[in-house]
Amino acid sequence: MTDQLTFPDAVQWAVPFFIAAILAEFLWIAIKGRGGRYETRDAVTSLIMGAGNIASGFLLGFIAYGFFMWLWRIAPLDLGTSIPVIVLCFVLDDLRYYWVHRFGHRIRWVWASHVNHHSSQHYNLTTALRQTWTYTFTFMMVVRAPLILLGFHPAMVLFVGGLNLIYQFWIHTEAIGKMPRWFEAVMNTPSHHRAHHGRNARYLDCNYAGVFIIWDKLFGTFVPEQDDDRVDYGLVHNIGTFNPLRVAFHEWVAIWRDATQPGLSLRQRLAYCFAPPGYSHDGSRDGSDAIKAKHLARHPEDHGTPGFERFDKKMPNTQAKNA
Amino acid sequence: MPLEILLVLVGGGIGGITLLLHLTGKSRQRVLTPGSARSEWARHAPDDTVTDVTLTHDGHVALIRTPAGVGLLWAFGADTVARPLQDFDWLDHPRGVRIQFHDFGAPGVVIRLDDLERKHWRHLLETA
Ligand SMILES: [Zn+2]
Ligand SMILES: [Zn+2]
């Protein structure tokens, strides 16, 4: 099996393009007077998070890479590096991305890493670069194991993963409304990903796609952006700091505080680490289901609309009649 | 890509974009009105009913009263952040008072107060 195989580090080579695109978006907003907003400290924090993400790749990347190379040595297959294989690898890695991203929102341990990507109340091209520093500690590299065992070389898997992240850069913008219909149907777009960044009850836990939105449609997590429900960007509980260290580690600190408080059972401590965000042992916090249910109690007219389909229509109607 | 070039690109890019944003007036802090303070609180805590709003004279901070208790809303760049006033300390600060939350993701805020409002705010915080 080929051990020595090099693919270009796509993300690093994209840095000049990122800078140029941010300047272009900023100018576009300045000239048109619409299509997004920029704020100095918010943007600087996002850019520093992006730089730190590359740095953490230098420092900790060897852990995932060592794991992948070990898998590669025991992999029974070698599919080679023909173009169709690279394309197939890209598509399957995008499926991998969907699930890692979904875990990133539904398992607090993984959310602690991913939360910082959602910690801005803005949505512009700098938000795309607001990336985690602590991904290695989520152990989500194991989700890539099947790809390597199937015979995709680790260097190729990392290369297509880099392309996936680069694709996601341009969709972090309000300057583009909707793409052509066929494109919106198949691909992840600014519109779909804006909804993903929403803290509105409707948009919680939707649109996990990286490149192809079809995964969300397949697995029932697709919610189209609604004209009458403008996306409110950020977290359900927005953070009040621009300090990159606090942004990078705040949820890890919160897990530590929750899980080590006195008087909990082991089960409760584990739930603070691994249950969906919003878990609390005494019911004092709301997860996304409770937030959606409370929203429907305030806005019964939203029953059955996108993002609320799973909720029973009868219950709050009785409430409304009694009121 | 050689590391030196990557460092220059990243450093120059961040520096240049920072300067551009600052010089085009994008560092301004949000200024609240009683109406926008209410709607911002409702955005952060949609279940609450705001019964009273006290704004600082500079408009960057609001004390919010709801049936559930007292909360603080403050300008966070162009946006706002809200927290209930529970589990916090406050200290005198040369420009007003400093609020410290025991929250790693929202460590605190300096409320700028002029001489006329300082006493009133101290009283509000003591009774919060
Ligand atoms: Zn996400
Ligand atoms: Zn995003």
Image: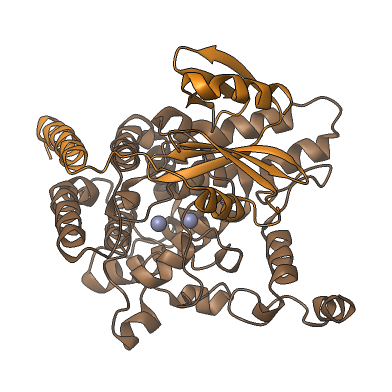
Chain colours: A brown, B orange
Q: Which corner quadrant of the image does residue A310 belong to?
A: bottom right
Q: Quadrant of the C terminus of chain A?
A: bottom right
Residue A209 visible at all: no
Nearer to the camera, A288 or A270 = A288
Q: Residue at point 46% right, 59% down? A: A197
Q: Is residue B4 above or below residue A173?
A: above
Q: As drawn, is B59 to the left or to the right of B40?
A: left
Q: Is residue A298 above or below residue A185?
A: above
Residue A114 rendering spot, x and y as whole percentages: 49, 47
Q: Is residue A239 above or below residue B38?
A: above
Q: Which corner quadrant of the image does residue A294 belong to?
A: bottom right
Q: Is residue B111 above or below residue A74?
A: above
Residue B110 rendering spot, x and y as whole percentages: 48, 24
Outermost residue toward the front? B116
Residue B18 rendering spot, x and y as whole percentages: 21, 37
Q: Residue at point 86% right, 34% down? A: A265
